[in-house]
Image (cartoon, rainbow, N blue to C red):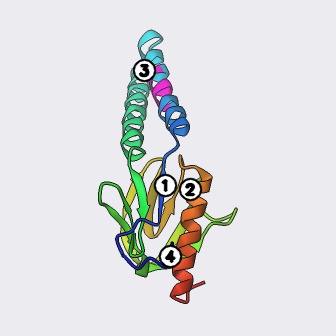
Amino acid sequence: MLNDQDPNTVLATITASPGRRILGIGSLWILSLMVIYVAIVQPPELGWQLFLFVLGGGSIWIAELMRRATAVTLELTREELRDSMGVVLARIDEVTGLDRGMFAFKPSNGFLLRLDNKKPRAWRPGLWWSLGSRIGIGGMTPAHEAKFMAEIIANLLAERGID
């Protein structure tokens, strides 16, 4: 598969697991509805009531962000890691390292890419985040898909002489 020199050939993909999507988004919706319900049915002092409404609204907002983020697929080519909407997370020639160990600061079921330059901060809940020169891939993703993509990235880095 890595012998294919076409730079647009997709070598690996990661898609959010449907079960994890339902559980994660559903949990946030249940949390938000419970908090708003408490704020309406048993209203505490006005300050706390406003806090509960803001917390409930924030949970709904994050659930919607998560729903949109996990609807896309991450695609790896010989040249870049991108999502199915065309957003480029990182070019392969920018990657200087890959962390996938148990104690790495990475998302669940995922891995961490170290880059040679800083990227703008970004967060797609349940799929990936970018902070400085690091990109975390994973969250609601199946472990086998993330592991396969990490192995291919490791092979691409080894071709460049990077461990």
Alpha-carbon neighbours of circle 3 within 10 Å: few (<14), some, or many (≥20)?
many
| Observer-nearest of 47 and 108 | 108
Frontmost residue, 53 versus 122 = 122
Mark 1 burial class by Cα count in 10 Å: few <14, some 14-19, many 20+:
many
Up/down of 47 relative to 101, above or below: above
Q: Which residue is mark 1?
A: 14
Is 8 displayed left or right of 52 in the figure? left
| Residue at the spot of label 4 | 2
Residue plotted at (61% across, 53% down): 143
Q: Amino acid at mark 2?
A: Glu
- The label shown at residue 145 is 2
Q: CA distance from mark 2 to mark 4?
A: 17 Å
Sequence-first tag of 3 and 1: 1
Give the residue pinned by disc 3: 36
Q: Of circles 2 and 4, which is in front?
A: 4
Q: Earlier in the sequence, mark 2 or mark 1?
A: 1
Q: CA distance from mark 2 to mark 1?
A: 6 Å
Residue 160 against residue 61 in the figure, above or below: below
Helix, strand or loop status at disc 4: loop
Residues shaded magenta: 28-33
Please state which amino acid type lies under the numbered disc 1.
Ile
Q: Earlier in the sequence, mark 2 or mark 4?
A: 4
Circle 4 residues within 10 Å: few <14, some 14–19, many ≥20: few
What kind of element bears circle 1?
strand
Of tags 1 and 4, the one toward the viewer is 4
